[in-house]
Structure formats: structure tokens, C-alpha cells
Image (cartoon, rainbow, N blue to C red):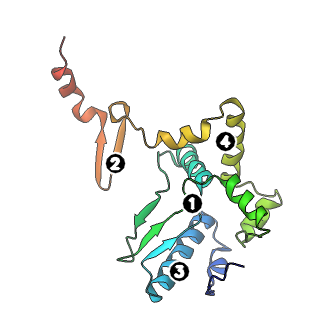
Amino acid sequence: MFHIPIQIYESNIFEVVTDVKDSPCYLCARMRRGCLYSESKKLGCNKIALGHHFDDVIETILMSMLYGGEVKTMMPKLHSTNYEGMELIRPLYYVKEESILAWRNYHGLKFLNCACKFTEMTESKEVESKRKEMKELIRELREKNPYVDNNILKSVYNINLNTVIGYHKEDEHYCFLDDYDEEKENQLF
């Protein structure tokens, strides 16, 4: 249909993570990403485009807050730290999942799901994934506030550092107490 050349590479990633008890999905994602970088580098590529979309981004923001205890998001593009000269891009960053599904249906396409035992269990309701939980939470919040999707994303753009207890950038850590007394001295009464 689209005549896009494709190359498929075999790996044993699913077999490796099958018996991992703690964070098998995280390990699998890291290993798959490493494989993608490695194979892309061999082909002479300098970019990897991933299919994460708007809904993935806002679900990730909530998962990071509710389960990771941090404010963090997927970046729309970033430089690889392990593969010099490689860049990761997410061209569907602002595209909502419903638009992608409508496009898929219009063209009569079928998308592949992750082919691992954890996803299969999640789809059969034996195990509930955190992403699925976030998807449901956002759906419930959207019933009360139709702007909740955009507000979640805007929240990571509109961080007011004067009202943040602490943050870190690379190895530098900041706590509001670091300059708390200095601010009092600078206030005019």
C-alpha cells in the first residue's frame, strides 16, 4: 500500500525478560531501545522515530507523578546518551490517539500490539497495566473537565519554580530552603 521498505531484526529480548520479577516492562523497553539504536547505527541512520502520541505523553506524566513520585515527561526529541550522533524523535507527540485510530480505520490497517506475555495478560484482564489505569483515570477526569488532557501537558510547560519545593537538573539539586532566608531579606515592606 505505502511501499515503504522494511527490515526486520530478530532478538531474544522477550525470552530474557520473561522471568524478570521487578520492572520487566522497563527492562524490555530499554533493551528494545538499545537494539533499535544499534541496528539503526549499523544502517547509517542518525534518527529513530518512535510512535508515541499525545495520550502516551500525558499518561506518562501521570504515571511518573503517581507511581514514580516525580514530575517527568517524554521529551519530543532528545540526543542519545549512549549512541553519539543519534537522536530520538517522536513525530506524533501532539497527535491524539483517537486521531491515529481514525486514520488506521479509514485506511483499513491493523496495528501490531506488543507481543509479550505481560501485554497478553493485561488484555485478558488478568493483570492491569499502569498505563491502562492512567488511560481510565484520564477518561474519568475528562467527563468532568474536557480540557484535562491539554492541562496535563501544559502543566509540564508551566512550572513556576518559585512554588516548587525542589528540583534537579543532571547532578545539581535545588531545595527551596537553599535561598529561603535570602528572599526574606530582599522583600520590601
Tell me the amino acid under the disc marked 1.
Leu
* Mark 3 to mark 2 CA distance (whole Å): 30 Å
Q: Is residue 37 above or below residue 114?
A: below
Q: Name the residue carrying label 4.
A: 138
* Mark 4 to mark 2 CA distance (whole Å): 28 Å
Q: Which numbered circle lies on residue 92?
A: 1
Helix, strand or loop under label 1: loop
Residue 133 image position (x, y, % from top left): 70, 48
Tell me the amino acid under the disc marked 4.
Ile
Helix, strand or loop under label 3: helix
The crowd level at tag 1 (other Cα within 10 Å; few <14, some 14-19, many 20+) is: some
Instruction: Tell me the mark number nearer the camera, choosing from 4 and 3.
Output: 4
Q: Which numbered circle lies on residue 168?
A: 2
Residue closest to the eye, 178 or 10: 10
Q: Are marks 4 and 3 in contact (CB under 8 Å)?
A: no
Name the residue at 67% across, 78% down. 2
* Mark 4 to mark 3 CA distance (whole Å): 32 Å
The crowd level at tag 3 (other Cα within 10 Å; few <14, some 14-19, many 20+) is: some
Q: Are marks 4 and 1 in contact (CB under 8 Å)?
A: no
**Residue 16 lies in quadrant:** bottom right
Whether residue 126 sits left or right of residue 155 in the image: it is right
Q: Name the residue carrying label 3.
A: 35
